[in-house]
Each structure stands twice: as structure tokens, then as C-alpha cells.
Image (spheres, rainbow, N blue to C red):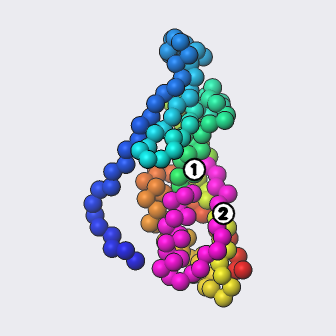
């Protein structure tokens, strides 16, 4: 495994609001929630609020991106662990979901459930493949940064 060092990694993004329809935020209904996330050297991400908050359903919302970020981080940690432990993953899908409770004070996520379905090469250690989800969770930078449970309901399939 690569050596782990205690040093900061910095990430920068530029968020540009595209929603001024002429009068800014003069009323709650009078502006668009559309925005762009710009990260140097990468395609922009077009975002908006969730539809229930007057957002644009054709764009990514922050809630979707949070669930996707947890799913992607877990997968990347898991694939690295499998490579180091000689478990050959040949396919990976995750049907992830998150629950957010809205209330008068705003709201918060109460949990995210990751449901990775992993296919490994015939003859590889399925029990180890399952156990590595636990280690991947412990090493996922995004999951360990959350103040709500990130649960896993993994399935291992041997090819």
C-alpha cells in the first residue's frame, strides 16, 4: 500500500450563479437556482437546487452530488484495496441512496446507504472481497468527514 503521510491536500472550485433573471433575489420566486461549478482543467458541472426548492430538474443538485461523492469515494478506496489484496474486480455498480430530513431550521442528511454490487474473478476470495468494504469505508475521506451514518449493503458475485 502507498505510504500515508499527514499533510494537507487542497481542492479549489469556482461556483458561478447563473440565476439572475433581471431583478436578482428581489423575491423568493423571482430568481433561478442554476449555477455552474468550475474546476480548472475539467468540464463544468451544471447545478441547481432540488426541484422541491424551485430548482431545475435537468441539473445536478447538491444532495445528489453528496450521495454520488460518497459512492465514488467508497468505490475508489475499495478498488485500490482489492488491487493490493489480489482480489480481481471485474465489474462494480452502486445503487446508492441518501435520506435528508427537512425541517423549519433547514435540514440534514440522516444517512446514506451504498449498495455496491461487485463482480470478482472466478476463484478469488469472496469473503475477503466483502470484508474489504469495511476497510474501504474506514479509509474513505468523504465518509469519514460526514456526521451521519454511511451504511453499506454490498453484494459480491463471482464470475
Residue 27: quadrant of the picture = top right
Q: Secondary structure at mark 2?
A: strand
> In this rendering, which labeled residue sits more in front, label 1 or label 2?
2
Q: CA distance from mark 1 to mark 2?
A: 14 Å
- Towards the viewer: 18 or 67: 18
Left-right relation of 11 to 92: left
Q: Residue at x 46, y 55 (%)?
A: 142
| 82 is within the stretch colored magenta | yes
Q: Residue at x 64, y 67 (%)?
A: 92
Instruction: State the image coordinates of residue 135 (x, y, percent, origin top left).
Output: 49, 71
User: Is 17 above or below relative to 149?
Assistant: above
Q: Earlier in the sequence, mark 1 or mark 2?
A: 1
Q: Which residue is mark 1?
A: 67
Which residue occupies the extreme bottom position in the image? 123
Tell me if I can see residue 111 in this picture.
Answer: no
Q: Which residue is mark 2?
A: 93
Residues at badges 1 and 2 in contact (C-beta under 8 Å)?
A: no
Instruction: State the image coordinates of residue 61 (x, y, percent, origin top left).
Output: 58, 38
Q: In what quadrant of the picture does the N terminus appear?
A: bottom left
User: Is 78 above or below relative to 7?
Assistant: below
User: Is 97 above or below relative to 28?
Assistant: below
User: Is 106 above or below relative to 64?
Assistant: above
Range covered by the magenta-colored residues: 71-98
Amino acid at each position: 500500500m502507498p505510504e500515508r503521510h499527514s499533510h494537507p491536500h487542497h481542492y479549489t472550485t469556482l461556483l458561478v450563479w447563473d440565476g439572475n433573471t433581471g431583478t436578482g433575489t428581489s423575491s423568493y420566486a423571482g430568481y433561478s437556482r442554476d449555477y455552474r461549478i468550475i474546476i480548472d482543467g475539467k468540464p463544468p458541472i451544471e447545478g441547481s437546487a432540488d426541484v422541491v426548492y424551485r430548482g431545475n430538474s435537468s441539473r445536478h443538485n447538491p444532495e445528489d452530488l453528496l450521495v454520488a461523492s460518497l459512492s465514488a469515494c467508497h468505490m475508489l478506496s475499495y478498488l485500490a484495496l482489492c488491487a493490493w489484496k489480489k482480489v480481481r474486480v471485474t465489474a462494480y455498480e452502486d445503487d446508492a441512496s441518501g435520506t435528508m430530513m427537512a425541517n423549519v431550521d433547514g435540514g440534514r442528511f440522516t444517512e446514506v446507504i451504498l449498495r455496491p454490487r461487485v463482480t470478482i474473478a472466478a476463484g478469488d476470495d469472496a469473503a475477503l472481497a466483502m470484508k474489504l468494504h469495511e476497510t474501504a469505508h474506514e479509509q474513505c475521506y468523504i465518509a469519514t468527514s460526514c456526521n451521519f451514518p454511511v451504511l453499506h449493503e454490498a453484494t459480491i458475485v463471482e464470475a
